[in-house]
Amino acid sequence: MGAPNYLSWIIFARQLNNNNKHPRVLTYINIRLIQLYFSLRKNLFNHKNINLILFFNCGIICFIINIYSDEWQSTLKYLKDTEVNLNNILIVTEDFNISNNDWDPSYLHPSIHVFTLREIANSFNLELSMHIIQVSI
């Protein structure tokens, strides 16, 4: 049993120790983007629930961060307490396990973790992007 493997996608995941046999974070990159030279960096964020993917775009180093945060918000706490000076973070994808009415209108009360999430996003110079549903007429 493991992660789905698709021929058109490269999988990036951390190798874990014997106690944690399965990674909690997987990042899929389509093989059509292979010329951007993606690589998993483990030296900047040393956390099992963070994938930091580096790639080159027109000679500029850019980053994608893929995150899983458990019910204790351990990844958010780690990011808040870790100082990393990274430029060119283009996107942070996640499963933060945070309910909030900004992305779930049925949730009426903001989670206390939303403020930490926004603080971290601001430190990386990122903004919340909402999914856009396109409708053809």
Image (cartoon, grey):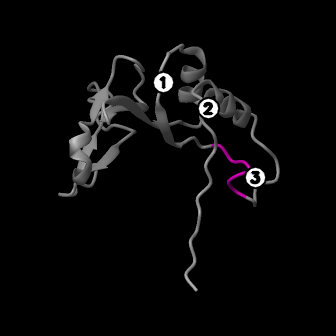
Residue at disc 2, secondary structure: helix
Q: Amino acid at mark 1?
A: Asn
**Residue 18: image x %, image y %?**
26, 26
Mark sitting earlier along the chain (2/3): 3
**Residue at the spot x=54%, y=15% of the render?**
82
Compared across the picture, whether 97 is left or right of 102 comes to: left
Q: Which residues are magenta?
A: 98-104
In the rendered structure, are the residues bearing label 1 and label 3 in contact, judged by CB atoms less than 8 Å apart? no
Residue at disc 3, secondary structure: loop
Compared across the picture, whether 14 is left or right of 102 comes to: left
Mark 1 surroundings: few (<14), some (14-19) or many (≥20) residues within 10 A: few
**Residue 48: image x %, image y %?**
39, 27
Which of the numbered marks, if any, corresponds to residue 87?
1
Q: Is residue 80 above or below residue 90?
A: above
Image-quadrant location for residue 65: top left
Front position in the image: 48 or 35: 35
**Residue at the spot x=65%, y=43% of the render?**
98
> How many numbered marks, from 0 up?
3
Mark sitting earlier along the chain (1/2): 1
In the rendered structure, are the residues bearing label 1 and label 2 in contact, judged by CB atoms less than 8 Å apart? no
The furthest residue to the left: 7
User: Which quarter of the rendered picture does the C terminus lie within?
Assistant: bottom right
Front position in the image: 75 or 120: 120
The furthest residue to the bottom: 137
Which of the numbered marks, if any, corresponds to residue 121?
2
Residue 102 forms part of the magenta stretch:
yes
Mark 2 surroundings: few (<14), some (14-19) or many (≥20) residues within 10 A: some
Residue at mark 1 to residue at mark 2: CA–CA distance: 13 Å
